[in-house]
Amino acid sequence: MGIYADYLNQNLDVNQLNQERKNQLARISQFRGGRAILVFASALTKNKAPISIDYDDIVPINDQLSNLTGDKIDIILETPGGYAEYAEQIVEYIRKKFKDVAFIVPGAAMSAGTIMAMAGDEILMSPSSSLGPIDAQISWQGKRFSAHAFLRG
């Protein structure tokens, strides 16, 4: 059984689960030498939810970065991807504030997430983690398509 299922099976209330999340992030920070830590994660299985990296992520990420101190940061990244131009902007904000940037990918960082991870000084992954193909996207009539597939069609 996975670590998340272990927490969920404890029937913790939201406040207890939130406190446990903070405790685990503090343990990661301590293990990594007291580095600042930021979680940028999506619920990858939520089909209809807005889970991709896009313009709406810029202000919240910048806001979270403004609360962090030091010159080293670990970013836990879990994403199906998104728009490369917004991933680039987010990385620019991160690089302006931190000298040493590491990305921790516990599961998957696809497409624009891969671009973000490659902008780091270090990428930490488990044997089951994955980076994904970088696939340019085109928006057309409210839908997103692979640029390659769109041009072929």
Image (cartoon, rainbow, N blue to C red):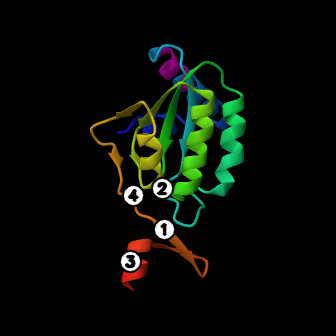
Does residue 9 appear anywhere in the picture?
no
Mark 4 or mark 2, which is nearer to you? 4
Q: Earlier in the sequence, mark 1 or mark 2?
A: 2
Is the residue 126 above or below the residue 90 in the image? above
Which quadrant is home to the C terminus? bottom left
Residue 26 counted in the magenta span: yes
Contact (CB < 8 A) between labels 1 and 2? yes
State the residue position of label 2: 81
Name the one closer to the observer, 94 or 68.
Answer: 94
- Spatial CA distance of label 4 from label 1 is 9 Å
Three-letter amino acid code at the position of disc 2: Gly
Q: Earlier in the sequence, mark 1 or mark 3?
A: 1
Badge 3: how crowded within 10 Å, few (<14), some, or many (20+)?
Answer: few
Q: Earlier in the sequence, mark 3 or mark 2?
A: 2
Q: Earlier in the sequence, mark 4 or mark 2?
A: 2
Does residue 71 appear anywhere in the picture?
yes
Residue at the spot 66% in from the left edge and 25% down from the top edge: 68
SS for tag 3? helix
- Spatial CA distance of label 4 from label 2 is 8 Å
State the image coordinates of residue 86 (x, y, percent, origin top left): 59, 53
Three-letter amino acid code at the position of disc 1: Gln
Badge 1: how crowded within 10 Å, few (<14), some, or many (20+)?
Answer: some
Is the residue 146 above or below the residue 99 in the image? below
**Span colored in magenta:** 25-30
Residue at the spot 43% in from the left edge and 71% down from the top edge: 146
State the residue position of label 3: 149
State the residue position of label 1: 137
Three-letter amino acid code at the position of disc 3: Ala
- Spatial CA distance of label 1 from label 3 is 9 Å
